Amino acid sequence: QKEVEQDPGPLSVPEGAIVSLNCTYSNSAFQYFMWYRQYSRKGPELLMYTYSSGNKEDGRFTAQVDKSSKYISLFIRDSQPSDSATYLCAMSGDTGGFKTIFGAGTRLFVKA
Amino acid sequence: DAGVTQSPTHLIKTRGQHVTLRCSPISGHKSVSWYQQVLGQGPQFIFQYYEKEERGRGNFPDRFSARQFPNYSSELNVNALLLGDSALYLCASSLTLMSGGRTNEKLFFGSGTQLSVL
């Protein structure tokens, strides 16, 4: 079993839809939870960075962490075609940037 | 400000050869990490260097080595290339900050070097 499980998709939604992306994990030592966006032929870009359980909102993006269920989510409101990319969940037990474990990524397509 | 820069962007090698990949971090960042991303998978941690010292190593064979220079730039070396080494190699730089009694470290990735081993 992988430490981090993420549905690879692809996920296709119409413009303006609310998108829900999820990951589960098995290592209870993870304390930092991140979401990255990766466009084709580019490196991952940090979207959300959270510590421990709870919610964090940044513009159209909301990250949720439920450590008791070992489950994290990213919600995208009012999705745009420019949101079409691969979304990677990531976790770390140390500082958030050390030995970070990534999910396989979910490919998202937002149709105009 | 310039982001993380990596060179070359693409590279084609044959089995058994060696390769050197280079990375320049964001100005002011003292830590550099290397990740391997195979097509269809998430990045996998290879190394992290901080202040020229190896801070950690992932589950990769000894054919993989790295170093960090006084200007904080870094090189990743891979010897005796195998077909399975074909991947996108990503470099990330980071800055460690203390906030609320804990250490926060955010990774900033370059665009990577696409290595193809034939």
Image (cartoon, coloured by chain):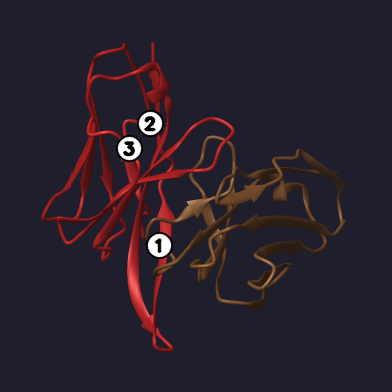
Chain colours: A brown, B red
**Which residue is under mark 3?**
B60
Residue closest to the far front: A1
Percent of width and height locating residue B14? 31, 11
Percent of width and height locating residue A47? 58, 62
Residue at image point 34% right, 18% down: B82
| Pointers 3 and 2 within a single chain | yes
- Foreground pick, A2 / A101: A2
Mark 3 vs mark 2: which is more N-terminal?
A: 2
Subunit of label 2: B
Identify which amino acid the numbered label 2 is placed on: Thr
Figure quadrant of residue B3: bottom left
Q: Quadrant of the N terminus of chain A?
A: top right
Residue at image point 44% right, 56% down: A100
Subunit of label 3: B
- Foreground pick, A108 / B3: A108
Classify mark 1: helix, strand or loop. loop
**Which residue is under mark 1?**
A97
Residue at image point 53% right, 61% down: A27
Residue B9's label in the rendered image is: 2
Q: CA distance from mark 3 to mark 2?
A: 22 Å
- Relative placement, left or right, of A34 versus B97 is right
Q: Quadrant of the C terminus of chain A?
A: top right
- Relative placement, left or right, of B106 versus A111 is left
Identify which amino acid the numbered label 1 is placed on: Gly
| Pointers 1 and 2 within a single chain | no
- Foreground pick, B100 / B2: B100
